[in-house]
Amino acid sequence: MTITRVEETHWLAVEDDREVGRGDAACRPDGRMFVSIDAWQGAVFDRLAAAMVADLSTPLYVVVDETDREVRAGWERAGFTTGRREREYAVPTDPRVTGLDAVRRPSAVTIVPAGEAQEALLRVLDRAIRDEVEATVGWQAMPAEVLPRPAGVTIVDPSKYAVAELSGRYVGLIRVAPVTRRPRIGLISVLADEQRRGIARALLAHALGSLHRSGAESVWAEVDESNAAAVALFEGVGARCTGGNLELVRL
């Protein structure tokens, strides 16, 4: 068996003139390098992992289903350890189930529906939130963002964002991807100086209510299990944990 780096981010394992495995690497918009391997045999996996680790600079990251013990063990043999766990939640939209029908918006806060936010103000808010996150836990603690986008662009489709407005400025946002089978809540965040006022809950109530009226019975969301506030927010509206992913890292 031979392992060949056929492209900058692509490796092939070949045995007896046939492909028996492949590895890929991709730099995500947040600058982190994620790797993956497709191989049926443990020995092939190990050879590919060793070659990729030798060729690439660390840190390297990989995401695996927490129930896939075989794949997890393969990456651990290559020196990867668990960096974080992300829970997957099924979130009901019916306000009679979530209890959000009784939620009142905080005083003087207005929810601007998705597609109606002023793009310039939305981008200012997005940048401010990212700066706050980077100055504390770091953006790597947020759900992984895999959408391709031009360098420096952090909002690909403004129409997916609903925002909370207070005194003429945007102070919180929620992003919903309207996937046909089950929409996904990709992000919900509020500026630090406006937290603990119920704004995130009001944004969630608005988004879930809109989805319920459009016919979606549930949505899904991913939450870092170390984010106690986000876990409490979703579990408080009846969200059910259906699984999770592990983010492994090799430093």
Image (tube, rainbow, N blue to C red):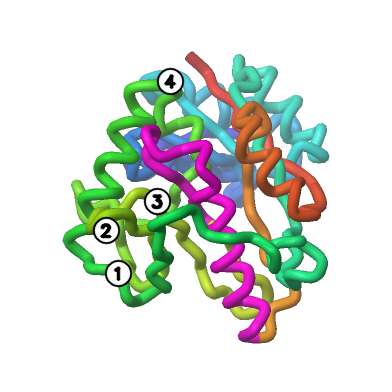
Give the crowd class for mark 3: few <14, some 14-19, many >=20 residues within 10 Å.
many
Q: Is residue 160 magenta?
A: no
Which residue is depicted at the point 57% across and 31% down?
48
- In depth, the one of 231 and 113 nearer the eye is 113
Q: Is residue 228 left or right of residue 48?
A: right
**Mark earlier in primary sequence (4, 1):** 4
Q: Do the residues labelled 1 and 2 touch (CB within 8 Å)?
A: yes
Hey, which quadrant is residue 46 in on the image?
top right
Examine the rendered structure and indicate whether residue 205 appears above or below residue 144.
Answer: below
Q: In this rendering, which labeled residue sits more in front, label 3 or label 2?
A: 3
What residue does disc 2 label? 122
63 over 105 or under it: above or below: above
Mark closer to the observer (2, 4): 2
- The CA span between labels 1 and 2 is 7 Å
Residue 69 left/right relative to 148: right
Horizontally, residue 222 falls left or right of residue 90, namely left
Residue carrying label 3:
172
The furthest residue to the front:
107
Q: Which image quarter is the N terminus in? A: top right
Amino acid at the residue labelled 4: Pro
Of the pair 22 and 94, the residue shown nearer to us: 94
Q: Is mark 3 on a helix, strand or loop?
A: strand
Does residue 221 sit above or below 80 in this rendering?
A: below
Residue corresponding to mark 1:
117
- Looking at the rendering, the stretch of residues picked out in magenta corresponds to 186-214
Q: What residue is rendered at 75% in x and 25% in y? A: 73
The secondary structure type at the circle numbered 4 is loop
The residue lying at 82 percent from left, 66 percent from top is 97
Q: What residue type is labelled 3?
A: Gly
Q: Helix, strand, or loop for circle 2?
A: helix
Circle nearer the N terminus (1, 3): 1
* Relative height, residue 237 to residue 24 (above, below): below
